[in-house]
Amino acid sequence: MAAAAAACALLCGCSLLGGGTREETTIYAPDPRISAKPSWPTVQWQLTISPATAARMIDSLRIAVRPTPGELQVYKGASWAKTPTQMLEDAVLRGLEDSGRIGAVARQGSGIDGDYKLVMDLRRFEADYAGAAVPAAVIEVNAKLLHPIDQQVVAARTFIVKQPAASAGVRDVSASFDAALGDIAQRIDGWVLVTGQQHEQQPH
């Protein structure tokens, strides 16, 4: 999947502490396209997606990088176009919509009453060197599929993907996030369809 590289460069940038000059900021917008797998079932039920949650440090427009264990920094002069939770929600939602395998899917609060609800907690969204010469985009998501009628947690699973960047450059790091985001969204989409359909076929 090709990454959407620099969407634009903000000439106004971000003010540097203690000075009047401004740095140029490049905005990156990962925009993965997800293909449905042949093994995904076609379902008639509806799904709502709750707003994804994450710690404040994770859900930032700044691009997080972990140069060494226990140390978290951000790339200077670079940011995301959307927060990581927004990117995750968009990728999962669009993947299900484009698959044509589900009766209806929408964000919570859209007016659609879902037969099932997807709740996601984003635990990691960072470039991690992990002792290597170049970092890897690491995304970790805990997902829960709920059946709102009886308040039952149908299933819960933690997904984690790691996609090495082609180089340590921010552009290549962004491209690795594009691939990782598409990978994890595809895994979550397939899991939702299979798990929800298995529960739907059980007496309840």
Image (cartoon, grey):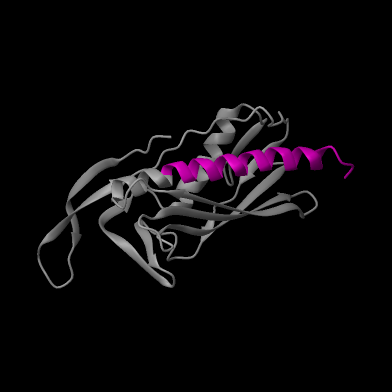
Give whichever of 136, 12 is nearer the camera.
136
Q: Provide residue 56's location: percent of width, then percent of height.
A: 44, 65
Residue 181: x and y in percent read 48, 45
Q: Quadrant of the N terminus?
A: top left
Q: Is residue 131 left or right of residue 100?
A: left
Q: Quadrant of the C terminus?
A: top right
**Residue at 36%, 43% in the rendered image:** 29
Q: Is residue 199 magenta?
A: yes
Q: Is residue 151 left or right of residue 160?
A: right
Residue 163 shown left or right of residue 118 in the figure: left
Front residue of 87 and 149: 87
The magenta segment: 178-204
Could you tell me how many numbered marks the image carries?
0
Q: Main secondary structure of the magenta part?
A: helix
Q: Is residue 147 above or below residue 73?
A: above
Q: Residue at x 76, y 37 (%)?
A: 197
| Whole-percent x, y for residue 8 in the image | 24, 42
Can residue 111 be seen here? The reply is: no
Residue 52 among magenta residues: no
- Whether residue 93 is visible here, answered yes or no, is yes
Vertical order, 25 against 65 (above or below): above
Residue drawn at x 62%, y 40% is: 189
Residue 84 in picture, x, y percent from top left: 44, 52
Name which residue lies at 32% across and 49% down: 167
Outermost residue toward the right in this view:
203
